[in-house]
Image (cartoon, helix red, strand yellow):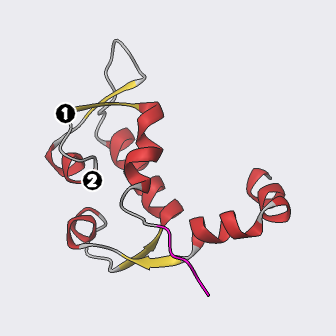
Amino acid sequence: MVLRRAAVESPKKVAALVDLVNLPTALRDFAGGRSQMSHLSFFLGVWSHIKNNNLQDPTNRNIVNCDEKLKTVLLGRSKVELSELPVLVKLHFPKVFKS
């Protein structure tokens, strides 16, 4: 529902989230060897990795304790707040200007 409303209001922003892009080597390893992936699907992969490996801090659920695999994506940081995740993932997906 939210994605549908966003597509109507700003289709270029949604297109940037769902367009396939070539992944750098470090991200390919995290994504299971896939060479292309959308920004949104990669972020969902990061989130599922956090949930499947119980990487959220048990006392403060807003903190993620990164394992070695996740550190490659999150710039080598050992702890990250949930609010920082989208920003850190977005750094790997530079804006492409289409003419």
Furthest residue toward top: 59
State the separation of the CA atoms marked 1 and 2.
11 Å
Predominant SS along the magenta part: loop
Q: Position of residue 70 (x, y in %)?
A: 24, 47
Q: Nearer the viewer, residue 46 or 51?
A: 46
The magenta stretch spans which residues? 95-99
Q: Which mark is residue 73?
A: 2
* Point 74% across, 57% down: residue: 3
Which amino acid, mark 2? Val
Q: Residues within 10 Å of mark 1 (few under 14, many from 20)?
A: few
Looking at the image, residue 21 lies above or below residue 54: below
* Point 38% across, 39% down: residue: 51
Q: Quadrant of the C terminus?
A: bottom right
Q: Residues within 10 Å of mark 2 (few under 14, many from 20)?
A: many
Q: Which mark is residue 78?
A: 1
* Point 70% across, 70% down: residue: 12
Q: Position of residue 37 (x, y in %)?
A: 44, 73
| Residue 96 covered by magenta stretch | yes
SS state under label 2: helix
Query: Is residue 64 left or right of 29 when viewed as pictured?
Result: right
Give yes or no for contact between labels 1 and 2 (Cβ–Cβ under 8 Å): no
Furthest residue toward bottom: 99
